[in-house]
């Protein structure tokens, strides 16, 4: 869901996982951003925020080279 070009919303993640909103936000901040160091972006659109993961972070890209 997060790696798709269109991204996803917190509501969609809540529906897929059965988690509450605060749990999804904690997962995005704690696991996706901090633990896995993925580049998570949030774009504000008419229907709300769209979250998606783009490109590998710079430090991982250097390790792969």
Image (tube, rainbow, N blue to C red):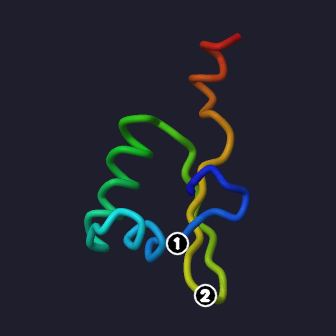
SS at mark 2 in the image: loop
Q: CA distance from mark 1 to mark 2?
A: 9 Å
Q: Where does label 2 land, which residue? A: 47
Q: Residue furthest bottom?
A: 46
The circle on residue 31 is none
Q: Nearer the viewer, residue 9 or 17?
A: 17
Residue 32, x across and y down, in percent:
43, 45
Residue 30, x across and y down, in percent:
32, 48
Residue 34, x across and y down, in percent:
38, 41
- Which label's residue is closer to the chain start, 1 or 2? 1
Q: Where does label 1 land, which residue? A: 9
**Residue placed at 65% from the left, 89% from the top?**
46
Residue 42, x across and y down, in percent:
57, 65
SS at mark 1 in the image: loop
Compared to 28, does 25 lie above or below?
Answer: below
Tag 1–tag 2 contact (CB < 8 Å):
yes
């Amino acid at each position: 869901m997060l790696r798709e070009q269109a991204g996803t919303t917190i509501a969609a993640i809540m529906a897929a996982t059965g988690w509450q909103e605060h749990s999804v936000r904690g997962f995005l901040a704690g696991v996706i951003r901090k633990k896995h160091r993925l580049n998570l972006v949030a774009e504000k659109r008419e229907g709300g925020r769209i979250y998606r993961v783009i490109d590998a972070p710079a430090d991982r890209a250097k390790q792969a080279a």
